[in-house]
Image (cartoon, grey):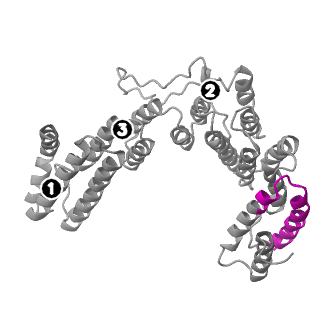
Amino acid sequence: MAGVSDKARFYLERSVNQLREWETKSIFTKDEIRAIVQKRNDFEHRVLSPGNTPAEWSSYARWEQSLQTLCSKRCQRLKLRNLNSAHASQARVLAIYNRGVNKHSGSAALWREYLAYLAKVKAAKRWRKTMTRAIRMLPKDPELWTLAANRFANDGDMASARNCFMRGCRFCTSDCGLWLEYARCEMKWLEKMEKKKAKGEPVVPPRPANDDDELLLLGSDDEDEGDDLSLPEPSAKQTKVFNEEAKQELASNPAMDGAIPMAIFDISQRQSFFNAEVAEQFYFMFCSFAKLSVQPRISQHVLDALDEQFPNDPSTCNCHIRQPLLGVSPYTVEFPRQLVVALQRLGPYLESTTDRASLEKKTMAWIDEYLQLEDLDSDLRAVLERTRARLSGTVAA
């Protein structure tokens, strides 16, 4: 353990100046500083010991953040400003996370925690570099691709967001998560453009996507050009899910008619993960954008595919049953009428479905969502509770 102790001492000595300033300006007492040093020493020995885990690095970083928060509150109370070590605490947290991901480069949770902290402290340049490193280490993690693409979209750069999603979809072909998020992002963009159009603001089409869906996370002029931060390239054996025809399909109509979300759904049908439940997730995601004018056309496109490929599947039946209720608030006068229509559909679909038990389970799930509303009308609650009881077999039909 001699090597571990030497390394721990090396990292602890870096904070000596900060601790002295805290003591000199009475931010912490001598006993408190002694306790801080002891706590840091314990953490350093833990994370430097053989067999350390990502959770230990995470605990260390979170403890430093709590110490940073406490220090800030005490400085405010003492009316202390312009500390010489003002940025030392933040730098220490960043260093801990950086050491942690270098040690455990395969820990997606630690990478995401690191990125969340960078976003919190608004370290944009370092966030881009770290995101690029994370994606290089974990190219098949859909959450990282989604995080990167949504950041572009939130900044108004839909072309880069699409490039990011398209690159990610070439790696994430075994799970529908990234494909759903790609379609959701396009729906949000359509919603945003519709609002602009309604206000009379000009709707500028996004710039063309890069060739070969190239992702450019590092575009600043002041970036270090010597850093090797290129993103991973799909191998020749990997299926290129977005062929030339598919790319033209996605790029040909970036306007307001919903062609891109429908194209994403159509391309996803050719992937190995596609089944009735995936299509069901697409359907309910599209339907959640109730105020979007093209939403009925897009959701009907998915429903038509379900009817064609998975007739009488529980997922298909569930979509038809819930269709009248989607986008209708349970607190409006329209809801009881639509609930009657949905419950009228329930019986025939329970008889015709290929898996009655699965459909009953799906139906009880959405009924439970309404029953969890505390201020739901008592008559509606009674109807839903009785329907659920019949489905669960607790009362006679």
Q: Judge whether residue 326 is colored magenta.
A: no
State the mark number for residue 3: none
Give how far across and how far down residue 354 sits, in percent: 85, 52
Give how far across and how far down residue 260 sits, in percent: 73, 36
Give how far across and how far down residue 296 sits, in percent: 82, 50
Q: Which residue in the structure is indicated by mark 1?
A: 38
Q: Quadrant of the C terminus?
A: bottom right
Position of 159 compared to 64: left or right? right
Q: Secondary structure at mark 3?
A: loop
Residue 7 visible in the snapshot? yes
For the record, the magenta segment spans 333-360
Among the two numbered marks 1 and 3 on one chain, the one whose residue lies closer to the N terminus? 1
User: For the residues carrying marks 2 and 1, which lies nearer the camera in this image?
Assistant: 1
Please tell me which residue is depicted at 74% across the width and 22% down the height of the picture: 245
Q: Which residue in the structure is indicated by mark 2?
A: 209
Q: Secondary structure at mark 1?
A: helix
* Label 3 crowd bin: few (<14), some (14–19), many (20+), radius 10 Å: some
* Label 1 crowd bin: few (<14), some (14–19), many (20+), radius 10 Å: few
Q: Nearer the viewer, residue 356 or 299?
A: 356
Q: Amino acid at mark 2?
A: Ala
Q: Quadrant of the N terminus?
A: top left
Q: Amino acid at mark 1?
A: Gln
Please tell me which residue is depicted at 27% across the width and 41% down the height of the picture: 95
Position of 379 compared to 17: left or right? right
Give how far across and how far down residue 225 sits, in percent: 37, 21
State the mark number for residue 104: 3
Among the two numbered marks 3 and 2 on one chain, the one whose residue lies closer to the N terminus? 3
Between the C-alphas of marks 1 and 3, the distance is 25 Å
Among the two numbered marks 2 and 1 on one chain, the one whose residue lies closer to the N terminus? 1
